[in-house]
Amino acid sequence: MAYGPMAKKWHIRPKSPLAQKLAKNLGINSILAQVLINRGVRDEESARAFMFPRLADMPDPWLLPDMEKAVDLVCTSIANQDPITIYGDYDADGLTGACLLYHFFKDLGVPCAVYVPNRLKEGYGLNHEAVRKIRGAGQGLLITVDCGVSNEQEVALARELGMKVIVTDHHRIPKDIRFHCPVINPQRADSSYPGMELAGVGVAFLLAVGVRARLRERGYFGGRAEPDMRDFLDLVAVGTVADQVPMLGQNRAFVKYGLSRLMSTRWPGLEALVESSAADPKNIDSTVVAFRVAPRLNAPGRISSPDICLRILMAEEKESVVQLASEINAVNALRQRLEQDVLRDIAGVIERNESILDKKVLVFGKEGWHEGVLGIVASRLVDKYYRPTLVLTFEGQKAKGSGRSIDKFNLYEAVCRIGDLLDRFGGHSHAAGFSLQRAKFNELKKTITEIAEESLEGEDLRPVLNIDAEVHFKEISRKLVDALDTLAPYGNGNPEPIFCTRSVQVLEARVVGEKHLKMLLREDGKLYDAIGFHMGTKIPWVGTHIDIAYTPKLNSWQGYESLQLKLADFREHVP
């Protein structure tokens, strides 16, 4: 009996001999201790810091190279009343970071402008036309957010035009690049800052912290209210979650406290985005941000222009944001339709030629697909088929593409190997973007297929499900679920814990909501409801025994709370 088109390989973490000791010393459940150890937390001090992150433990921002220079440059510009422009990326991280600095400067009584490029017309990062436009408006200081480390020429142009520049970014810095301006980036090789994995908005926040501290030293706030940095933590949380940086270290404190602030946010635009997403404003976690708020902030930049997101995040009057939130919802719905159109086309291609799935890499291209959804579509296909995937759109003689990959296939290295076929490319191990001449599409497809065939084994194409511990139903309780909540916020590097239980009997099994699987399960006399989202096509026979992988959750329905198992996978039990 098989359940599903692609069986996952279960990797059950072995019990650590440290778990009982850690549990005893901390006074916590041994299952929670095991999960902590699985996350690399092996001592009491680290465990407390992980479960109860504190903003007070934030590393010293002055450890970031060029922070002193950048802060002094900002303070000098404020003193000289130099016009300031914040240049942010068009995604949720860049938007929240740019608007954080906008509101921060406004709290200081310092006017500034915000510029976010149009992805479809201007591309990623700084561009020459934008720099000239900003200088033409008389701007004196340019501060980048979530971009800039790849823009040596554009930064040089800005300085040639008489502008002062500060680059704040978190992306990997290209080799041999040289700047003659402050560059605040935790990825710098000469950085002694302990947190390398900040999002762009996190770096912008640290710049603001430094500026406030220096202004305080200079007596700027005599008789003037200081900005409350806690007001900006919800923006930091949204950008950090949206950018999928590791939910470890300082990011945990940013997101934990930021989510709390988001429930009573100062910013009408964030409040409107949460309300328009149908999320419970009093129960916001990282999942709500990742799957409801962030997609709405990203959609306009993908499909048309990010300006509407800029306007809603900069707004300070609630009356002005309701219509904007409605318009953003409409753009997000359009993004979903465009995405489904491409997925439907690709499903038709596969249906007509199922041998495509025998390849170790999937490559699809068609005229008319919207370039803004190519990356999302590639991600969906990787999730479904667990193959490196490239999706391209054709326009005239040009082709643009986006790729996503699996753990065992470094996509950026593969794209570098075919760089002679491409006009432009960039990315990292799991994602890449590129452009080329349409006439070279077939050669690209052939070459990337050859690279995948030589570098991937069959077992590499089988997804691995990491399981934190094997447990019995009698060990699952409300007390355990409450204890596991201390592991939140969840995200990259800190996924929700997954457990497995073997030889569970299926008492009931049915499809709900057309595509979800709901079951009643029993193990050793203990019964639990289980829900498998998007598992409605694989229903086990009632009375059979299965092994299940799941996360225990508290389910609330019409005022009634009960424990429910959220399934990650299940398989036939083999004695």
Image (spheres, rainbow, N blue to C red):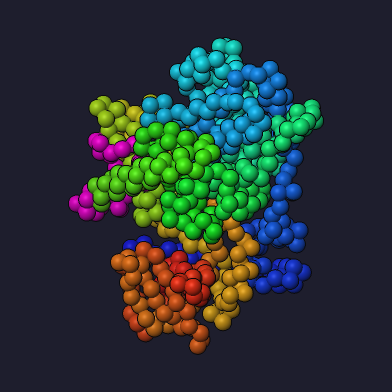
Is residue 453 at least partly visible in the picture? Answer: no
- Residue reaching furthest to the bottom: 525
Query: Magenta segment: does it hold 357?
Result: yes
The magenta-colored residue range is: 348-374
Viewer-proximal residue among 33 and 105 = 105
- In which quadrant will I find the C terminus? bottom left
Q: Depth check: give the residue in front, 428 or 328.
A: 328
Q: Is residue 139 above or below residue 507?
A: above
Q: Quadrant of residue 425?
A: top left
Q: Residue at x 36, y 63 (%)?
A: 534
Q: Residue drawn at (77%, 69%), measured in percent from left and top? A: 25
- Residue at 61 percent across and 73 percent down: it is 480
- In the image, taking residue 351 as reference, residue 175 lies left or right, namely right
Q: Position of residue 1 (x, y in %)?
A: 33, 74
Q: Image point 45% across, 28% down: which residue?
A: 117
Where residue 351 sits: x, y (%)? 22, 54
- Image: 191 above or below 275: above
- Give the percent coordinates (x, y) of residue 169: 58, 33
Q: Position of residue 296 (x, y in %)?
A: 43, 45
> On the picture, is 265 further left or further right than 357?
right
